[in-house]
Amino acid sequence: MIKNHWIATSTLVLALAAMPLAATAQSDQGAKQDMKDAGNATKEAGKDVGRATKKTTKKSAHAVKKNSKKAAHKTAQKTKEGAEKVEEKTRPN
């Protein structure tokens, strides 16, 4: 009976002594994996920002082109109207 008690006690002591070592090894792996995950998340976030920037740039360039053409046509129209008014005023009767 005493022998069984001694075996159980020594097994329990060894198990308790080994727990901090196992926990340390696990937390190191966990920290390493956390760093990898953080790096991948940063990488993906950078890609997302790049895609958004590209999309916004294209959209802005299209709007500028459209509005520039619109302004050029409007300016040409008003210039033509102004020229016609001047022509009417300077026409001999």
Image: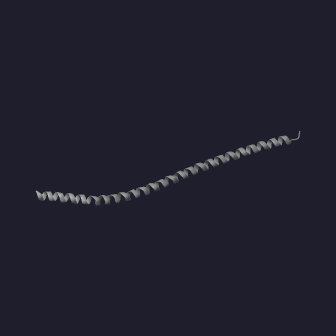
User: Could you say which quadrant of the image residue 18 lies in?
Assistant: bottom left
User: Could you say which quadrant of the image residue 2 lies in?
Assistant: bottom left
**Percent x, y of residue 77:** 73, 43
Q: For the C terminus, give its image quadrant.
A: top right
Q: Nearer the viewer, residue 3 or 41?
A: 3
Judge left or right: residue 27 versus residue 91: left
Identify which residue is drawn at 63% across, 48% down: 64
Judge left or right: residue 56 versus residue 26: right
**Percent x, y of residue 39:** 43, 57
Residue projecting furthest to the top: 93
Number of marks present in the image shown:
0
**Percent x, y of residue 10:** 18, 60
Where 76 sits versus 28, above or below?
above
Q: Nearer the viewer, residue 22 or 50?
A: 22
Q: How is the image coloured?
A: one colour
Residue projecting furthest to the right: 93
Judge left or right: residue 92 versus residue 74: right
Identify which residue is drawn at 23% across, 58% down: 15
